[in-house]
Image (spheres, rainbow, N blue to C red):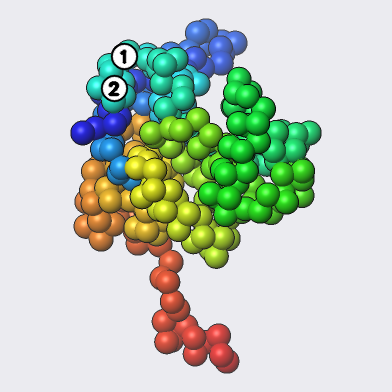
Amino acid sequence: MSVFEAHDLCKSYAQPRQKFLGKMPRKMILKQVSLFIEQGECVALIGPSGSGKSTLAKLIVGLEKADAGMLSFCGQQATSFQPVWQQEIQLVFQNPQAALNPQMTIFECIAEPLRNAHQQQIDEKVRALLEEVGLSSELLTCYPSDLSGGQQQRVMIARALSRQPKLLILDEAVSSLDMMIRQQIFVLLKRLQEQRGLSYLFITHDLRSVEKMATRFYVLYDGEIVEENTSIHTLQHPFSKALYEAMLPLYPSRKRRECYAK
């Protein structure tokens, strides 16, 4: 069963008016984009900067409205994001420093989506969420600036989980982290996926992250889905192949090691 589907989504933005050229035509960002995500599945979306990845994420969570197309969530179809989906679809941003209010404690950051619940329930829920993402309750009185980048991203994940979502959109959520912390976040996300039955839309430009997280992926290029695949080793589109060829090896070759040794 598909938890989410997008059908022929289109999105354009107005361009600045030029003094001598008059009104400019709208710039197309997304051109009839279609994809689906099964329940409990992690689907990746790959593409270069400016390809429309983040715009698509904004359409899915209702931060932007599509010009045309159809969205479907758990069998409910609509031409745009529906408020009733707000609890079920959550977005984890790339930069937690910008997404977390620096004047709020970690407790307040996580508890904000739960403000309508009873205070005792909020206290218990926040502590449980913090433990679930691998953080100590001692951090509840700290501020975002007191935490490392990896800890801040765990707080963002805990905040997203507070609404009991079915779909998490991870928009470059690990790209700013070093390799060791990134691997820890991968382990955390996979554990949460198994325990909660979560579905993920994993937005990235890193093929190695795709290989670790996703069972299937789409390639978005110049606003269009140009490829759907299940393995980064069988890529077909020229951009996909170029991205694969630019990927650094996991381990340096013997010749390179000898060069460094000298």
Whole-percent x, y for residue 260 in the image:
55, 85
Task: Name the residue at 66% across, 53% down.
Answer: 136
* Mark with earlier residue (1, 2): 2
187 in relation to 123, above or below: below
Q: Is residue 19 left or right of residue 60?
A: right
Residue type at tag 2 = Ser
Most foreground residue, 253 or 217: 217
Q: Which mark is residue 106?
A: none
Task: Name the residue at 51% across, 17% down.
Answer: 15
Q: Quadrant of the N terminus?
A: top left
Residue occupied by mark 1: 78
Residue occupied by mark 2: 72
Most foreground residue, 7 or 194: 194
Most foreground residue, 125 or 157: 125
Whole-percent x, y for residue 8 in the image:
26, 22
Whole-percent x, y for residue 211 in the image:
34, 58
Residue type at tag 1 = Ala
Say if mark 1 contacts mark 2, CB within 8 Å.
yes
Q: Is residue 262 left or right of residue 53?
A: right
Residue 250 appears in view: yes
Task: Name the residue at 28% across, 38% down.
Answer: 39
In the rendered image, the residue lying farthest to the front is 120
Whole-percent x, y for residue 238 in the image:
28, 49
Task: Name the residue at 36% across, 26% down.
Answer: 30
Most foreground residue, 68 or 73: 73
